[in-house]
Image (cartoon, rainbow, N blue to C red):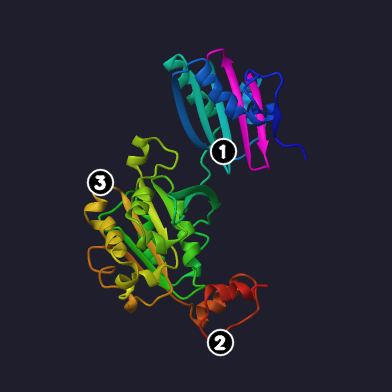
Amino acid sequence: MTSPLEFTSANSELAGAGVYIRNRPWIDDTPVSFYFREIHGRLLRHVAHEKISVKGWSLDMLGSFKSQLEASETFDGQRISWLLRHNPDLITLIEVVDGWAEILTAGKDYQAVHETCAVIARQVGEEADSAIVPITFWASDPDKYPKAMMRKLEAPSWESLQDNYDTGVVEGVEKLLALRDCPKERMILWHGAPGTGKTYALRALLREWQPWCDAAFITDPERFVGGSPTYIFDVANFGGGRTASEARQRSKLIILEDAGELMTTEARVTTGQGLSRLLNMTDGLLGQGLKVMILITTNEPLRAMHPAVIRPGRCLNEMEFGTLSAGQANRWLRERGSKAQVLGSATLAQLYSMLG
């Protein structure tokens, strides 16, 4: 196998200086490297940036800008990069990854740079699809900074789900759906046995809140709560591809799924000051000026929760997801064409397994 780096002593500006390395051309001949070489080589001092949602990555997304395509690269079917040259001193780099397009336009004329970037963003962007919800997933390496990964997931409508729940859950969720901004109380606590539909209700909530609230899903809640406070600050202040002014206007929902053991009366022993910092984010100094809510789902019973978590004035919504009674469960099965019956209460997961 040929090495991507070739050792040679001929045809080089360093001839006579001993052994040296020459990069093979294909190492640097990518749209990204072209873009940054142009910025430095032509002294393109103005740069505009947009990050928008897209449905695909066909070249047709570029419309009339296809004629200005100078370079392209596809990486393992997961990322595509396009370099557009509008004129000798005005270029645009477009990178599409996982349903998001990042657009960087650089040039010598400030107005031309920003106008061109905005026009291209409108060209390749899409109208918002309410069934597709953008979520930022967070994870922290013990030796590195927290890392954000932006993805988009399908989310059901609440109308399609509400008959899966008892009256108490329906009323509680609908009160949350009616919100249009971050309220004074910012803690949401959902508890119940596995299979009772907490995650589906959460996805429906995120779909309804899309116009005004961004979602941050914490994959390692034990580090988020018990680790460095930097993790909490990074998540709370992350713009998610939006401009700073846009991000300040929007609310954020931080989601800790199956994290009940971190909120129990013994939590102080295992997480130190982490629980206090998390709660302070909802109604203390840490949360001042931030429109941040925290939703915790847990299988733990409410009586096991630390009193500070559920104290009055802090909890916006505390709700138990229970099983459906035998009558509700059998009606649910009949409405979906099943002849199966249950003799006692059943979880939503059990009912879906009976549909075959």
The tag earlier along the polypeptide, 1 or 2, is 1
Is 230 in front, or is 179? Answer: 230
| Number of the front mark, 1 or 3 | 3
Q: Is residue 275 magenta?
A: no
The magenta stretch spans which residues?
A: 68-89
Can residue 168 be seen from the camera position used here? no
**Of helix, strand and loop, which one carries label 1?**
loop
Q: Nearer the viewer, mark 1 or mark 2?
A: 1
Q: CA distance from mark 2 to mark 3?
A: 52 Å
Q: Which quarter of the image is occupied by the N terminus?
A: top right
Q: Between marks 1 and 2, how big is the CA–CA gap?
A: 48 Å
The quadrant in which residue 100 appears is top right
Relative to 122, say whether 14 is above or below.
above
SS class of the residue under badge 2? Answer: loop
Task: Find out whether residue 75 is within the magenta segment.
Answer: yes
Q: Position of residue 330 (x, y in %)?
A: 56, 79
Mark 3, residue position: 289
What residue is drawn where x is 55% and y is 22%?
Answer: 37
Q: Quadrant of residue 75?
A: top right
Q: Which mark is residue 343?
A: 2
Residue 222 spot, x, y in % from top left: 41, 64
Give the mark nearer the N terminus: 1 vs 3. Answer: 1
Residue at 40%, 61% in the rendered image: 223
Along the horizontal axis of the image, is 286 left or right of 65? left
Q: x%, y% of residue 318?
A: 34, 68
The secondary structure that dominates the magenta segment is strand
* Label placed on residue 54: 1
Query: Marks 1/3: CA distance?
Result: 31 Å
Quadrant the C terminus occupies: bottom right
